[in-house]
């Protein structure tokens, strides 16, 4: 598991790194809010340990910027402040847990494992391919930074394609899994909705992600010719 520690207290940062690495974690450390944010935006972490009082940018602002950038890595706030208002604000901005200094290292690992498990459950509802992301739980679709607004049937079609990334799905498979028994199987409804999706997903200047193999079917993936 890879952990990012953002804390300006050098002694705590060193202790955290040594203890976590002894327990099998990979650890990056930043002692500044701005540089910590940059690391969190450019690397993949399983958990972020985030002090609230930081130079450059405070921990609450770091959390806000990460959530605003659609980074959903679990965040555990580390702080000397135990006031209820601070806890409420931290959770409202997207924090996942809150631990007051000084704390037990064993307890910290238990909390890291707990938020990591919760995050993995949630991530099962998010499917990505290239810069296309679909959140099944919230019914949100993004292509890069662009929000894609889909109808109910368009969303169901995209969800089925995204759950089978790279697999060529026949027209019949798509129809059977997206439409109900009241739809006419002899109509061109699958082709119509594929074209609707392409117009919304494969934006001008973007690599086409909804492709087909002639006579075989449709798939989400890189264009292939055989």
Image: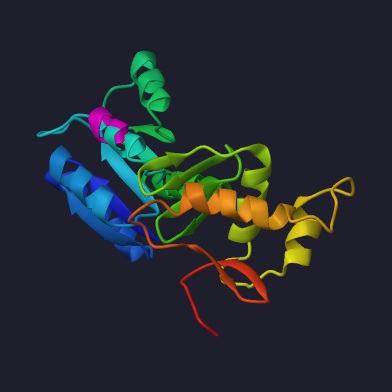
Residue 153 in the image: state x and y as whole percent.
Answer: 68, 43
From the top left corner, tell me how far across and down residue 137 is, in percent.
61, 40
Could you tell whether 38 is left or right of 202 in the image? left
Residue at the image position 14 percent from the left and 40 percent from the top? 34
Q: Residue 42 appears in which quarter of the rendering? A: bottom left
Residue at x 37%, y 40% (from the top left corner): 75
Between 178 and 81, the one lying in front of the other is 178
Q: Taking the image as drawn, is residue 126 in sight?
A: no
What stretch of residues is rendered in magenta? 60-64
Please say whether residue 59 is visible from this viewpoint: yes
Residue 147 vertical position relative to residue 83 in the rendered view, above or below: below
Q: How is the image coloured?
A: rainbow
Q: Name above or below for residue 97 compared with residue 224.
A: above
188 with respect to 202 (left or right): right
Q: Is residue 133 above or below residue 102?
A: below
* Residue under the image location 62 percent in, 45 percent down: 155
Q: Nearer the viewer, residue 218 or 134?
A: 218
Residue 220 in the image: state x and y as whole percent: 55, 64
């Amino acid at each position: 598991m890879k952990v990012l520690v953002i804390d300006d207290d050098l002694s705590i940062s060193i202790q955290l790194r040594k203890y976590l690495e002894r327990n099998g974690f990979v650890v990056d450390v930043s002692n500044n809010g701005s540089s910590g944010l940059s690391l969190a935006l450019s690397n993949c972490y399983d958990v972020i340990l985030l002090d609230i009082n930081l130079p450059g940018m405070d921990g609450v602002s770091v959390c806000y910027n990460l959530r605003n950038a659609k980074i959903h890595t679990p965040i555990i706030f580390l702080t000397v402040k135990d006031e209820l208002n601070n806890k409420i604000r931290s959770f409202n901005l997207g924090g996942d847990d809150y631990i007051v200094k000084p704390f037990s290292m064993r307890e910290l690992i238990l909390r890291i494992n707990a938020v990591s498990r919760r995050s993995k459950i949630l991530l099962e509802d998010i499917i990505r391919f290239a810069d296309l992301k679909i959140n099944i739980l919230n019914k949100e679709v993004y292509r890069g930074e662009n929000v894609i607004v889909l109808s109910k049937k368009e969303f169901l079609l995209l969800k089925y394609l995204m759950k089978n990334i790279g697999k060529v799905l026949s027209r019949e498979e798509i129809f059977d899994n997206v439409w109900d028994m009241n739809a006419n199987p002899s109509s061109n409804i699958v082709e119509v909705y594929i074209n609707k999706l392409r117009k919304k997903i494969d934006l001008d200047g973007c690599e086409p992600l909804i492709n087909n193999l002639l006579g075989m079917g449709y798939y989400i993936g890189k264009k292939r010719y055989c």
